[in-house]
Image: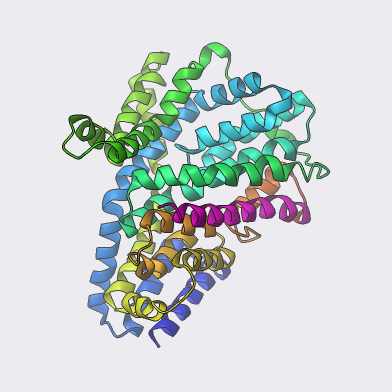
Amino acid sequence: MPLAIVIAGIILLFILIARFRLNAFIAFVIVSLLVGVAEGMDFITVSKSIQTGIGNTLGYLILILGLGAMLGKLVADSGAAQRITTQLVEKFGKKNIQWAVVLTGFIVGIPMFYTVGFVILIPLVFTVAAATGLPLIYVGLPMLASLSVTHGYLPPHPAPTGIAVMFNADIGKTLLYGIIVAIPAIVVAGPLFSRTIKNVEATPLKEFLNPTVLTDDEMPSTMTSIFSALLPVILIGLQSVVALLLPEENIIRKITDILGDPVIAMLISVLVAIYTLGIARGKKMKEVMDSVASAVSGITMVLLIIAGAGALKQVLIDSGVSEYIGDMLKGSTISPLVLAWLIATVIRVCVGSATVAGLTAAGIAMPLVGNGVSPELMVLAIGSGSLMLSHVNDGGFWLYKEYFNLSIKDTLRTWTVMETTVGVMGLIGVLILDTFI
């Protein structure tokens, strides 16, 4: 019976979001309340459980996602994203253009939310394709594969960061393992797959072919752009590597533990970017701060959706459902990593949003963590599943379709197959990594 109530609650969540287009945060709160009451909790207890879940989830995340949004905005507005793109394309040349856009998507995608990265980089991809005479899909899809992978796998993006908080996973290890898994996933879903669909013709709408392109003097240098965009990865990654090599009492280990703390790393990165991408470029502090403020206002709804998922997770724990599911799955012969991936995949197909799918799956899969399975790999398994089978109920599907001006059929055979390849390759990578950890 407890499991039937949860399934009914998840179905209701799907219907509210997909059929009635209800805001995801409101839908999460309604479903959390109904599931809690149906499981035998009184309204006041459920209300307190929801408050606890929201508070515990947002307490840490609001710092990471807020600072991450600020960094992404600074990278975009300063022209650093454009500099990285143009320089990599120039260095790699026409023959290796796909690898240039893959690397660009990866570098820019780490600090920048998916939609922002898409809107910033797609016009530049259009320009590159027009200048080289190569098919647009051949040039653009590898970059989108990179953006999708960073969005689904890597902190500081909303879903992987939120899931890591739920599972008490180490952010540094999640990032390190995520990069290892990401590389083959991007290669197969991007450059290799796009070579099989060169015959798909994309004719982007004219309004997307005239982006505002900064002059060379208006952009920061290549090194400054890459350093500013990747500083969080450098600091967090360094901490994870040093932690494997040096004992806790070592002074270098203590310093890197401080600098590599995700909140400290993001704060340092934003402060550095304010100078390198703003003040040092001759911008006034007010102009830079206005840019930063607009970035934070843009993630408000993302934070609320994550908070709603945290509320549902807490209700499942407080009502005893998580323990019930855990006991039921103890005898299962299927790998917890595969189960978590499957749960995320099903929710992704029904709801569409990768963020909602990942966070909802995390709440359901919570009991699977701690049975000898790495919580960091569980984050990646769910992240991979949350990218699977994107179709007409996913905003990213329509963003891609409209910008590339494709038919539904061609969108399904390019975008949907690419996203599914990313999801499958992610699971394979996680299972391989699991044998070594």
Is residue 418 located in the magenta-colored stretch of the structure?
A: yes
On the picture, is 23 further left or further right than 235? right
Could you tell me residue 119's position as x and y percent? 58, 38
Could you tell me residue 308's position as x and y percent? 37, 62
Q: Residue furthest right?
A: 199
On the picture, is 324 further left or further right than 205? left
Could you tell me residue 358's position as x and y percent? 46, 59
- Asked whether 394 or 433 is in front, the reply is 433
Q: Residue furthest left?
A: 249
From where the camera sits, is residue 213 visible? no
Q: Residue at x 34, y 62 (%)?
A: 310
- Asked whether 435 or 397 is in front, the reply is 435
- Which residues lie in the magenta part? 409-437
Q: Residue at x 77, y 56 (%)?
A: 409
- Asked whether 184 or 121 is in front, the reply is 184
Q: Quadrant of the N terminus?
A: bottom left
On the picture, is 262 further left or further right than 397? left
Q: Residue furthest front?
A: 436
Q: Residue at x 73, y 40 (%)?
A: 137
From where the camera sits, is residue 87 visible? yes
Figure check: 235 above or below 298: above
Is residue 301 located in the magenta-colored stretch of the structure?
A: no
- Asked whether 436 or 264 is in front, the reply is 436
Q: Residue furthest top?
A: 217
Could you tell me residue 295's position as x and y percent? 41, 38
